[in-house]
Amino acid sequence: SSGKSALINLSCRLIGSRVVTFNLTAGCDTSDLLGGFVQSSDGKFVWRDSILVEAMEKGYCAVLDNANFCPPSVLDRLN
């Protein structure tokens, strides 16, 4: 194919990076993009990074499909 996604995938392959795609919805919130506190098995609350943060830490290319569906406040925090 010759669309935007194909171009991004090719570009990332050329630089030797994995591509992680996130399909966002109108109900997305900050924790979907950045992470949040979760309760561990021992009852304590610990921070857990989102898949996006993990991808960025590993140097992967991240594609945020349909980011325009997220509320502006979420995109501001991401920015």
Image (spheres, grey):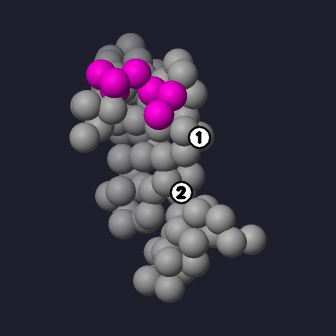
- Compared with 72, 2 (above or below) is below
Query: Could you say where residue 67 lies in the image, as x and y percent from the top left?
Result: 47, 37
* Badge 1 amino acid: Asn
Quarter occupied by the C terminus: top left
Q: CA distance from mark 2 to mark 1?
A: 10 Å
Whether tag 2 and tag 1 are in contact, CB under 8 A, the answer is no
Mark identifier at residue 32: none
Query: Could you say where residue 68 lies in the image, as x and y percent from the top left?
Result: 47, 34
Closer-to-camera residue (70/43): 70
Q: Alpha-carbon neighbours of circle 2 within 10 Å: few (<14), some, or many (≥20)?
A: some
- Identified at 49% across, 75% down, the residue is 12
Q: Alpha-carbon neighbours of circle 1 within 10 Å: few (<14), some, or many (≥20)?
A: few
- Compared with 70, 56 (above or below) is below
Q: Secondary structure at mark 1?
A: strand
The residue singled out by tag 1 in the image is 23
Q: Can see residue 36?
A: no
Query: Is label 2 or label 1 in front?
Result: 1
Quarter occupied by the N terminus: bottom right
Which quadrant would residue 7 be assigned to in this image? Answer: bottom right
- Identified at 53% across, 68% down, the residue is 8
The residue singled out by tag 2 in the image is 20
Q: Is residue 1 left or right of residue 50?
A: right
- Identified at 33% across, 32% down, the residue is 75
Q: Secondary structure at mark 2?
A: strand
* Badge 2 amino acid: Val
- Identified at 61% across, 62% down, the residue is 5
- Compared with 1, 15 (above or below) is below
Which quadrant would residue 45 be assigned to in this image? Answer: top left
**Residue 62 lies in the magenta-colored region:** no
Query: Could you say where residue 70 lies in the image, as x and y percent from the top left?
Result: 45, 27
Q: Can see residue 65?
A: yes
Residues drawn in magenta: 68-74
